[in-house]
Image (cartoon, rainbow, N blue to C red):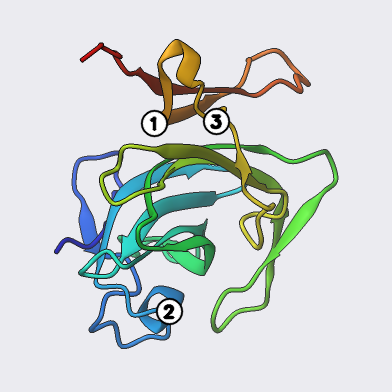
Amino acid sequence: DAWLGVFQSADGGDTWQSTLYGGFFLDPAAHPLKTLRFQAAADPVVRSGPAGAAFYAGIAFTGDKSGSALHVSTYLDLNNSESDDMPFKTVRTTVVHQVRAPQFIDKPWMYVEAGPDGQTCSLPVPGLPNQIVPASIVHVAYTVFLDAADSTAAIMYTRSNNCGLNFSTPLRLNPIAVASVGLNDHGNGAAIAKPLAANSLSLVRTWRRVRERVTGG
């Protein structure tokens, strides 16, 4: 089974340093994914936020896929040492949504934008005072397969207004099956984008939807 990695470059991509994403089963540090006894992780998505913040989303699951979860970690560039090859440090990991078999969480996608003017986040940094940074809004879309055959799925959406500390109750985006026109509940490949227009309140979400061919017997 695979686990996630973290790669950082402090010289514009000429050289890279890497480490495992936290929570693997031999991780010596406390971590939510280790506490939940997940043995595998996949589908990483990384996005930057304002003031040196960054966000890393992925899925984690048990070896037999009896349990799975969407998680988001908040990183902060501490910028306190010119010799640090990995300046972005994890400040917290939030388990956003968990399901049990036959359901399975898959394929997250993330969009991050600056919060309203004047809104800030207090980020806990081990060994240092909390860092106060401009707020980031984190939008996440993902799939929840609803049966063991992955033949039906819900496209879900959630957001955090406080730099990934907590997230809204997940909302289903795709409609329920419409048998009369041959559409089922299957969807995947969710993505999020936002217009470049200043102060736009629109958020565009896309996903694939499968049309089943119904034939007579």
| Neighbourhood count class around disc 2 (C-alpha, 10 Å): few under 14, some 14–19, many 20 upward | some
Foreground: 196 or 57? 57
Q: Is residue 48 visible?
A: yes
First along the sequence among labels 3 and 2 = 2
- Determine the CA span between mark 3 and mark 2: 36 Å
Residue 185 percent across, percent down from the top left: 44, 31
First along the sequence among labels 1 and 3 = 3
Foreground: 60 or 30? 60
Residue 10 percent across, percent down from the top left: 32, 50
First along the sequence among labels 1 and 2 = 2
* Total tally of numbered discs in the picture: 3
Residue 44 percent across, percent down from the top left: 33, 48
Identify the residue position indicated by label 2 in the image.
Answer: 31
* Numbered disc 3: secondary structure: loop
Q: Are marks 1 and 3 in contact (CB under 8 Å)?
A: no
Q: Outermost residue, front direction?
A: 217
- Determine the CA span between mark 1 and mark 3: 9 Å
Q: Are marks 1 and 2 in contact (CB under 8 Å)?
A: no
- Determine the CA span between mark 1 and mark 2: 33 Å
Residue occupying the point 45% across, 62% down: 99
* Numbered disc 2: secondary structure: loop
Residue occupying the point 51% across, 21% down: 178
Identify the residue position indicated by label 1 in the image.
Answer: 186
